[in-house]
Amino acid sequence: MAYKKILVPLSGSELAEKALPYAKSIAKLKKSQVILFAVSLTIFVDRRDRLFSSYLEVNAKELNTEGIKTTTATSYGDVAEEIVKYANNNKIDLVVMATHGYSKAKQWMFGSIAQKVLYGTEIPVLLIKSKSREVSAEFNRILIPVDGSSFSESVFPYVEELTKKTNKEILLLHICEPPIVPSYGSRPINPTWKKYQDNMWGEMEKLSTTYLNKTMAALKKKGMKVKSRVVKAQTGEVVKTIMHVSKEENIDLIVIATQGRAGVSRRVYGSVANRIVEESSQPILLIRPAIPMPPSPPENLLDDIWQSYIGSKV
């Protein structure tokens, strides 16, 4: 995965321009070509079109003077559709764009240009948030949530290319949710629900640590600077935990795999990526891998484990 060509959609707004420092940073690091792209809603050449072209040329000239090979392109029609079409037809390696990333009241998933671009192409999309706090455009600290699946690990080649021959630090985050067991009401159970849950949670932490150690070793062999954390989270608080760790660790970029509309994972990765876009203030690199989303376990699987565990103790 090489970042040879970076597409930056611009509209003349301050929001859209938030993407420029990040595209510039990556382009300088990877010696990428940057294409500044604008879409007009009309096919008629008028003053607005001339202003668009002039606006793009001014920004391109500034980047060129900094040693970044920059060109411009314009199109007409639906903004999201034209961005996707241009990206797919011109061998773009990365789309860098800003988004409002509305909160739950105005979820980004419904009709936003960023959402349509993400679902319309398999090209990685780097989203820069409109209300982002001041973070480093250099992406010195990168967070990757992983769950042990090939789906969540599919982002590794993209991060490896981004961090190669740099001192950037990667944090692998594995979140352990409490094991879910059926309720037996007031009937006495031996071992108790609490004891069983604590035992299972302890085992999950051990397995998670072993997994992360092996993964870190493999990434370090490729020259990547990697750390890891295992964090307990209450049921339903995965996104909240990712946000907390991101703030605590001063993360500059979150990288996560997403399947878009194609499916919803029981785990962290996939549908939860949408919520991270909504709630995170950090830039987010979203990867749509060809690897299928891991299937959810059968609903009675944990109940079967519980029954087996109970049976072994009575």
Image: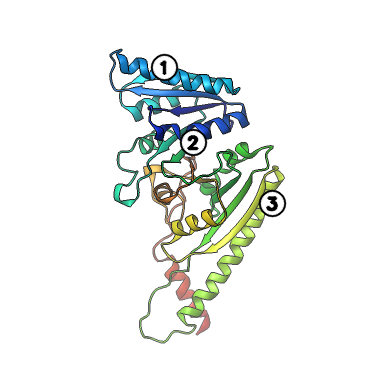
* Total marks in image: 3
**Kind of element beneath mark 2:** loop
Q: Nearer the viewer, mark 3 or mark 2?
A: 2
> What element does badge 3 sit on?
helix
Residue wearing tag 3 = 217
Residue at point 62%, 61% (across, down):
209
Which residue is label 2 attached to?
124
- Local crowd at mark 1 within 10 Å, few (<14), some, or many (≥20)? few
Q: Which mark is residue 54?
A: 1
Q: Measured from the top left, where is residue 183 in percent x and y?
A: 38, 76
Q: Callout 2, which amino acid?
A: Pro
**Residue 115, numbered label:** none
Image quarter where the N terminus lies is top right
Q: What distance separates the C-alpha of mark 1 from that of mark 2?
A: 28 Å
Q: CA distance from mark 1 to mark 3?
A: 50 Å
- Judge depth for marks 1 and 3 and give the one in front: 1
Q: Is residue 92 above or below residue 114?
A: above
